[in-house]
Amino acid sequence: MTNLLPPARLGHIAANRATGDAAYRVLPPEDFAIARTEITAWDGYAETPLESLAALAGHIGVGEVLYKDEGPRFGLGSFKALGGSYAAQRVLQREVSKAVGACVTLADIRTGKYADECARITLVSATDGNHGRSLAWGCQRFGAPCRIYIHAEVSEGRAQAMRDLGAEVIRIEGDYDESVRLAKSEAEENGWFVVSDTSWPGYSLPPRDVMSGYGVMTQEINEALDRAPTHVFLQGGVGGLAAGVVAGLRQYWGDAMPRVIVVEPELAACLFESAKTGTATTVAIDEETLMAGLSCGEPSELAWEILAEGVSDFLTIPEAIVAPSVRLLARPLDGDMAIEAGESAIAGLAALIAIRQDAVLSQKLGIDGQSRILLIGSEGVTDPEIFATIMREEVAA
């Protein structure tokens, strides 16, 4: 086997898993069911493809590699379309119900029955790009004003995509976590409503709704398979995606659920550090990772409850293998489908290939010729300029 990526040293910690019922308690099956019923009724809903990368699997010596490509999701380019938009709808449902003194349904919000009331409710959030785009899209659909806070390193292309959906975009000089703090404080001052994918003490309903929306993706995967994968690689970030998928896998497969491996950039490894300490742990981000959607220093405490019980291993990957993995997916081995993906989408792919170039780590993780691997391609090309730059790097090299 020839190496597909530059040599890379991965950080690894085997989780000291807790026991408990977080996969059912934090995200009950009925919450997943409500989200699925509503989201599949939205105009434009379609299942995203689950691609088999057979040539890659053969080259790296595993039984199967499956890649869930979230690029086509609602035309927004990422799995986040399932979370922020749905959470926005739920906030509007709750607040309009209070305003009119009656039980308002999700369908009422979707069909515009209370359009005047929605127009008086401002929703806000901080984002690295995809969550904000999803929230802006949802607000545009449901008729609510939207304010999105972005940090200094968010690309202008991603900012403009949110403006094009009607959001007011506020850029700050600091990092993602500082934009979260500003969104919270200005919402409190003005009577706006935060729709975040991360939780904190006293704030859990919208993050729970976000993760429930992600369950649609997990259910699509589960129902496409005749047996559980042996391993699933999940992106880190604040932990919402990973927690939503872990809960969905646990509820569907039970004791047969796959071994879950969380992957983060070594520049933003808050879940890796949380695994070390055994509690949700914030880290400082001194340098931004190319995987913009994963540049998060503060984990969601709600998500961590699920991850602490459901994740077997935490990995960090270096920046040097990110761009080559994007190029490998776009220009694949003969026989595999070419997939254009964003930088955050390839975290699991990069980690898997690097693992198979390391016999010791492969053994630690139980990955061999019979392993069936599931990867979550969390985003397509959400910033064409960045993607084009990544693809040109190969020519320059």
Image (cartoon, rainbow, N blue to C red):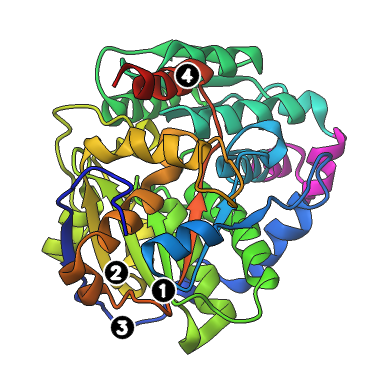
Taking the image as shown, residue 191 lies to the left or right of residue 236, namely right
- Callout 2 amino acid: Ala
Residue 282: horizontal and vertical position, in percent? 18, 45
Picture layout, residue 360 above or below residue 199: below
Q: Residue at x 82, y 33 (%)?
A: 114
Packing grade of label 4 (10 A; few <14, some 14-19, many >=20) is few
- Tell me whether the residue at label 1 lies in contact with that at label 2, contact meaning CB atoms closer than 8 angstroms: yes
Q: Residue at x 32, y 38 (%)?
A: 322
Distance from the alpha carbon under mark 4 to that under mark 3: 45 Å
- Residue at image mark 2: 308
13 sits left or right of 64 in the view: left
Answer with mark 1 or mark 4, whichever residue precedes in sequence.
Answer: 1
Asked if the magenta segment contains residue 158, the reply would be no
Q: Which residue is mark 3?
A: 19
Residue at disc 1, secondary structure:
helix
Whether residue 301 is visible, yes or no, is: no
Q: Quadrant of the N terminus?
A: bottom left
Determine the secondary structure under disc 4. helix
Assign a secondary structure to mark 3. Answer: loop
Task: Report how far apart the C-alphas of labels 1 and 2 lie in the structure.
Answer: 9 Å
**Closer to the camera in the image, 356 or 346:** 356
Residue type for callout 3: Thr
Which callout, 4 or 3, points at the residue further toward the start of the chain?
Answer: 3
State left or right for residue 207 relative to residue 29: left
Residue wearing tag 4: 388
Q: CA distance from mark 3 to mark 1?
A: 9 Å
Q: Relative to 392, is 98 above or below?
A: below
